[in-house]
Image (cartoon, helix red, strand yellow):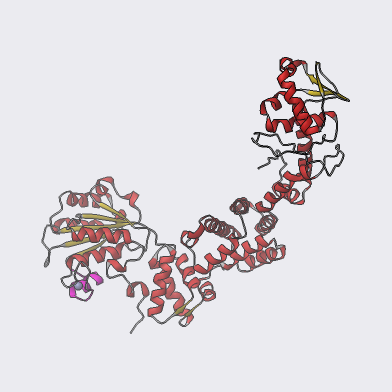
């Protein structure tokens, strides 16, 4: 017995065997069962996705007298004839052949005759977009008033070439590219039935080459089986089909994440040795980084979101767990830049090598976040250079207080160290915590002098409106209480207006401190090795440092 090619041997015989087009199978079966099948159907979609097979299944379902519930028996004369394309009541016309016009003319002449047996006469017009204008016109006449017993099934890969007059008279069915996992599953069934051992990643590779066409994938499987003696491995597939080794892609990403320049250089050598076109490689790498991101952001559903063999998904998941989504975005952007440069490159090898080395030096967002967190706390853990270190004093909180807690914990009654301005700032901040209004008013005053038991508060000329308030008895009584609590001393309070060169109000002092701190943070950030390498990689300068709480 001669070898029967897989595509023919495994041609689906019923709607349930049709791979990857469940939405169409279901609609057609429903239409058959409710006797609402339209007279003209248009099957559109990429090649090898089951359009012609579906047309034959539909023809058999309509004409087979043996099968029940529109499942063709596949064995009766009718089923056999339709399968061979030799049924007198199921007429197949190839729109691409030279006699297309002739065939349509004949169709028009014979369409009125009833079928020799049964109820339906079916015309299957393949590649219908190839018909000439005159053939379309002839067809249109028939479609306008189709005889009751006739069903037209038209199939095309290029629906945009079909005249609107025809389209408007058809019910359209869109066949989709078959997901690679489904093609792989089908190939696996075929191998099992034929006693062929096959690795999943090997079959997936074949499916991928078929680009969503089951027919193409099946014919590639034929080819691989012929050369592999009933045992299909990924190596064999790569060898027989002359493909590039996708395992290099995951390895590349691993090397980038490990920052292993040795591995990166080695990978470039292997890419060129394997004859992997660097442009194709960079495109494949982009696709794989996209898959990595999908796996990263899809949470528990990571298994469902990418069309890859399970072994590859598991590898990606492992890598994704060590990165943030931002890290992957960054790698993707860098790879994209490289992929854009490659076609123009004099020496693609150098561009690819540099791209990968740059990517392996890319900073990790997680590290940058840690770095930033470290910098943000630095000023409070390190005593400012102009203040004398004093272990007993509570750390100065230079961040502006937005809200005052109702019950501030009592603090030690000690005067803050430093200049008069700093002492005043510290006191005002403490008061602000328990008396927001008074704190806000004192914020715009300064400590003019502290002479024994007399405390003189200065009010800048711009804030003269505060004079009355500060001379108010009730106000002064409260302030004296705070001074007793926080500085442990009784004071006479005096108020004077006038500006001062030496003393600063808390508002001014905080402004100054903030500027100093900004400068300090900036220096620390700029000096950090990670940031330095980042700005070398991106050729950027730091324009702003934003602290996050
Ligand atoms: Zn049958």
Q: Which residue appears at 71% of the width and 23% of the height?
A: 441
Q: Relative to the observer, which residue lies in front, 25 or 76?
A: 25
Classify residue 29 by image quadrant.
bottom left
> Can you give x and y, in whole percent of width and height, for residue 191 in the image?
41, 77
Residue at the extreme right of the image, as rendered? 452
Instruction: Pick the quarter of the image with the C terminus.
Output: top right
Residue 106 in sight here: no
Q: Relative to the observer, which residue lies in front, 408 or 517?
A: 408
* Quadrant position of ligand 1: bottom left
> Can you give x and y, in whole percent of width and height, for residue 67 in the image?
19, 71
Read off the magenta span: 74-88
> Residue 426, relative to residue 456: is it above or below?
below
Instruction: Pick the quarter of the image with the N terminus.
Output: bottom left
Residue 265 in sight here: yes
Classify residue 388 by image quadrant.
top right
Q: Is residue 231 magenta?
A: no
Q: Which residue appears at 15% of the width and 62% of the height?
A: 120
Looking at the image, residue 398 sits to the left or right of residue 180; the answer is right
Q: Which residue appears at 39% of the width and 59% of the height?
A: 177
Q: Relative to the observer, which residue lies in front, 519 or 45?
A: 519
Residue at the extreme bottom of the image, as rendered? 1
> Can you give x and y, in whole percent of width and height, for residue 112 in the image?
12, 57
Q: Relative to the observer, which residue lies in front, 510 or 63?
A: 510
> Residue 181, relative to residue 445: is it above or below?
below
> Residue 147, relative to residue 165: is it above or below?
below
> Can you give x and y, in whole percent of width and height, for residue 409 in the image?
70, 39
> Residue 46, relative to residue 497: is it above or below?
below
Looking at the image, residue 66 sits to the left or right of residue 402; the answer is left
């Amino acid at each position: 017995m001669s070898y029967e090619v897989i595509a023919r041997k495994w041609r689906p015989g019923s709607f349930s065997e049709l791979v990857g087009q469940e939405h169409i199978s279901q609609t057609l079966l429903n239409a058959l069962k409710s006797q609402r099948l339209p007279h003209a159907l248009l099957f559109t979609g990429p090649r090898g996705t089951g359009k012609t097979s579906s047309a034959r299944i539909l023809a058999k379902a309509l004409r087979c007298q043996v099968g029940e519930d529109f499942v063709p028996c596949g064995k009766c004369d009718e089923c056999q004839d339709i399968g061979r394309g030799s049924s007198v009541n199921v007429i197949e016309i190839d729109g691409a052949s030279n006699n297309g016009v002739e065939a349509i003319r004949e169709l028009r002449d014979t369409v009125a005759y009833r079928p020799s047996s049964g109820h339906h006469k079916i015309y299957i017009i393949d590649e219908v977009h190839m018909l000439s204008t005159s053939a379309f016109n002839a067809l249109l006449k028939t479609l306008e008033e189709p005889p009751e017993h006739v069903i037209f099934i038209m199939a095309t890969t290029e629906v945009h070439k079909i005249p609107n007059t025809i389209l408007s008279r058809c019910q359209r069915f869109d066949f989709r590219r078959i997901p690679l996992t489904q093609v792989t599953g089908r190939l696996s069934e075929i191998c099992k039935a034929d006693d062929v051992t096959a690795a999943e990643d090997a079959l997936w590779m074949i499916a991928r080459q078929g680009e969503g066409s089951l027919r193409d994938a099946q014919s590639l499987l034929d080819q691989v089986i012929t050369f592999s003696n009933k045992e299909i491995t990924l190596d064999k597939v790569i060898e027989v089909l002359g493909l590039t080794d996708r395992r290099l892609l995951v390895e590349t990403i691993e090397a980038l994440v490990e920052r292993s320049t040795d591995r990166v250089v080695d990978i470039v050598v292997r890419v060129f040795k394997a004859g992997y076109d660097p442009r194709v490689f960079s495109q494949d790498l982009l696709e794989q980084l996209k898959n990595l991101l999908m796996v990263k952001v899809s949470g528990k559903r990571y298994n469902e979101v990418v069309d890859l063999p399970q072994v590859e998904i598991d590898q990606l998941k492992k890598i994704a767990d060590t990165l943030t989504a931002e890290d992957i975005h960054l790698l993707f952007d860098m790879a994209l830049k490289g992929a854009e440069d490659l076609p123009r490159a004099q020496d693609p090898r150098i561009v690819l090598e540099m791209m990968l080395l740059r990517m392996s030096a890319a900073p990790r967002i997680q590290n940058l976040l840690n770095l930033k967190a470290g910098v943000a706390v630095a000023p409070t853990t390190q005593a400012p250079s102009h203040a004398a270190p004093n272990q007993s004093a509570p750390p100065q909180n230079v961040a502006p207080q937005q809200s005052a807690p109702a019950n501030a914990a009592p603090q030690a009654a000690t005067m803050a160290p430093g200049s008069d301005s700093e002492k005043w700032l510290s006191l005002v901040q403490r008061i602000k915590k328990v008396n927001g209004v008074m704190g806000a008013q004192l914020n715009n005053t300064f400590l003019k002098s502290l002479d024994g038991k007399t405390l003189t508060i200065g009010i800048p000329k711009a804030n003269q409106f505060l004079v009355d308030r500060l001379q108010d008895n009730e106000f002064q009584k409260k302030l004296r209480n705070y001074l007793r609590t926080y500085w442990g001393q009784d004071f006479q309070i005096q108020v004077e207006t006038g500006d001062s060169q030496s003393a600063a109000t808390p508002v001014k002092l905080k402004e100054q401190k903030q500027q100093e701190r900004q400068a300090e943070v900036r220096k620390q950030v700029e000096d950090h090795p990670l940031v330095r390498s980042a700005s070398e990689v991106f050729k950027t300068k730091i324009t702003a440092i934003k602290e996050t709480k």
